[in-house]
Image (cartoon, grey):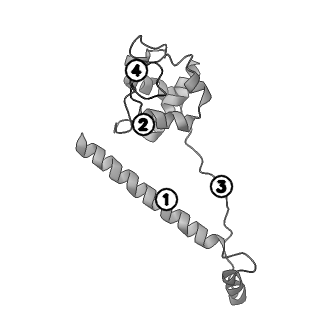
Amino acid sequence: MRDLLITCHRRYAMRVIALCAACVGIIALSGCGRRGSSAGKQAAGSGHSLPAITQGAAPIPPVGNAVRGKKLFADNCAMCHGNQGQGVKFVGQDLQTSKFVLSHSTAKIVAFIKHGRSATNPGNHRHIAMPPFGGNANLTNQNLYDIVAYMRKLQ
């Protein structure tokens, strides 16, 4: 289990480094086509055209599939949250009426499922621990979006 966690952390760190490197490259290139900048004048005088860079475009989050999510929910969540998300007394929260599910974005709920929450967390009013599922190799990011899509159908 420890080796799995180390591997997951390394993969995550590599993705963060790659994302940061890409951002630095985009920021460096974003000034190239501006008039008045030395890079823009240099390129304009050389006869080469610079590629247009779209700024401010946010990455599109994955879209969940509720049909796939239903099976994933049954396999991974139902033992604590019930087959229909009705909750299991003293074990798991009722997801059919959950204000948390209603009021948070899909990405925020996916992050919550990945990280979980301890029973002693100040935000945990029922004092029932939610284990982290981020290290579960059977639950990819897309699988988690599918589960959340199904959870939203329960409400």
The answer to whether 35 is drawn above or below residue 81 in the figure is below
Q: In which quadrant will I find the N terminus? A: top left
Q: Amino acid at mark 1?
A: Leu
Q: Residue furthest bottom?
A: 45
As measured in the structure, the alpha-carbon distance from the residue carrying label 3 to the one carrying label 4 is 39 Å
As measured in the structure, the alpha-carbon distance from the residue carrying label 1 to the one carrying label 2 is 20 Å
The answer to whether 90 is drawn above or below residue 118 in the figure is above
Between marks 3 and 2 in the image, the one whose residue lies nearer the viewer: 2
Label drawn at residue 57? 3
Between marks 3 and 4 in the image, the one whose residue lies nearer the viewer: 4
Whichever of callouts 1 and 3 sits on the residue coming sooner in the sequence is 1
Determine which residue is flagged by label 1: 19
As measured in the structure, the alpha-carbon distance from the residue carrying label 1 to the one carrying label 4 is 35 Å
The x, y position of residue 41, in whole percent, is 71, 85
The residue shown at (46%, 25%) is 124
The x, y position of residue 150, in whole percent, is 53, 25
The residue shown at (42%, 30%) is 117
Q: Secondary structure at mark 2?
A: helix
The x, y position of residue 128, in whole percent, is 40, 20
Q: Amino acid at mark 2?
A: Lys
Whichever of callouts 4 and 2 sits on the residue coming sooner in the sequence is 2
Label drawn at residue 128? 4
Q: Residues within 10 Å of mark 1 (few under 14, many from 20)?
A: few
Between marks 4 and 2 in the image, the one whose residue lies nearer the viewer: 4
As measured in the structure, the alpha-carbon distance from the residue carrying label 1 to the one carrying label 3 is 15 Å
The residue shown at (42%, 18%) is 92
Q: Quadrant of residue 139?
A: top left
Between marks 1 and 4 in the image, the one whose residue lies nearer the viewer: 4
Q: Residue furthest top?
A: 89
Q: Secondary structure at mark 1?
A: helix
Label drawn at residue 114? 2
